[in-house]
Amino acid sequence: MKENIIDFKRILIFLIIAISLSNIFRFDVFETKEILQKLPTWMYLISVVLLEGSGVFIGALIAIYLLRKDRKTSISFYGTSNRKGLLMSAIPIVLLTIIGVKNDYEININLYGLIVVLGSLIYCIMEEFGWRGYLQEELKNLKPVKRYLIIGFIWYFWHLTFLTEATISENLFFLGMLLFGSWGIGQVAESTKSILASACFHLIIQIMMFNSLIKNGLDGTQKLIILGVSVFLWILILKKWQNKYELKSLNEEQSPNR
């Protein structure tokens, strides 16, 4: 049955688009950043984010469209709760705007914090359409260990970190983080069916470690505050989210009209 089939052609289409298009801009092959720098700073930063995430996002949209021709998908942008997903995303936005992010663009730190967190969240959403919105759905019939290992390795390969000046130990650490992330964020996607909720956890990883827009704009204490407050509140939201979803599912199963 098509319900249980993994279509490697879909995966290949996704990968070709995701790797080629995103990395053209991530590695600035055509020196587009030089052209974009003529724009106002905030527009330049957002444009770079959109272009770097474009490949995985466009590849995912095409692959999801093809996947839905064969079977229904359960993971969507909002998932099983619009409000809770929006509430989760509002927490880091408020925190970074209040704390502010130091920068070299002579932009007010609070305004720059808002620009950075919005741009980064958009980027994470674009990525999550690929890793959770498409690939996790494509591989959902595999055992969890296999599924998350495959997603983690593909996620690592997409970055092409091994082609940069990063050392072997740095590459192995990055791979380990993405394998752990594929499991952790995958659990969020399974429980909420939400790309937005998944993107929030993707965002906190970026803020703590890899975000090029932040660099040294936040000190260690500020990062820990953002991490601690965000994750604590998210866990509370996720518990209520899951309880409400389970209650709704139970009521639907017991409904006499079914």
Image (spheres, rainbow, N blue to C red):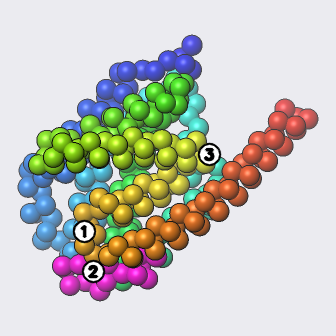
Q: Is residue 55 visible?
A: no
Q: Main secondary structure of the magenta part?
A: loop
Residue furthest right as drawn: 256
Q: Amino acid at mark 3?
A: Ser
Task: Please provide the residue range marked out in magenta.
Answer: 95-109
Rendered residue at 24%/63% (across/down): 212
Residue in view at x 23 percent, y 78 percent: 103
Q: Which residue is mark 2?
A: 102
Where residue 205 appears, as percent x and y from the top left, is 39, 57
Q: Earlier in the sequence, mark 2 or mark 3?
A: 2
Can residue 242 be seen at all in this image of the molecule?
Answer: yes
Q: CA distance from mark 2 to mark 3?
A: 36 Å
Q: How many dots with numbers?
A: 3
- Residue 215, numbered circle: 1
Q: Is residue 94 magenta?
A: no
Q: Nearer the viewer, residue 39 or 146?
A: 146
Mark 1 → mark 3, Cα distance in angstroms: 32 Å
Q: Nearer the viewer, residue 135 or 101?
A: 101
Q: What element does badge 3 sit on?
A: helix
Q: Earlier in the sequence, mark 1 or mark 3?
A: 3
Q: Which residue is mark 3?
A: 191
Q: Does dot 2 land on a helix, a strand or a loop?
A: loop
Labels 2 & 3 near each other (Cβ < 8 A) = no
How packed mark 1 is, by other alpha carbons closer than 10 Å (few <14, some 14-19, many 20 or more), is: some
Q: Position of residue 52 (x, y in %)?
A: 25, 52
Q: Residue 106: give x, y in percent of width and height.
A: 20, 84
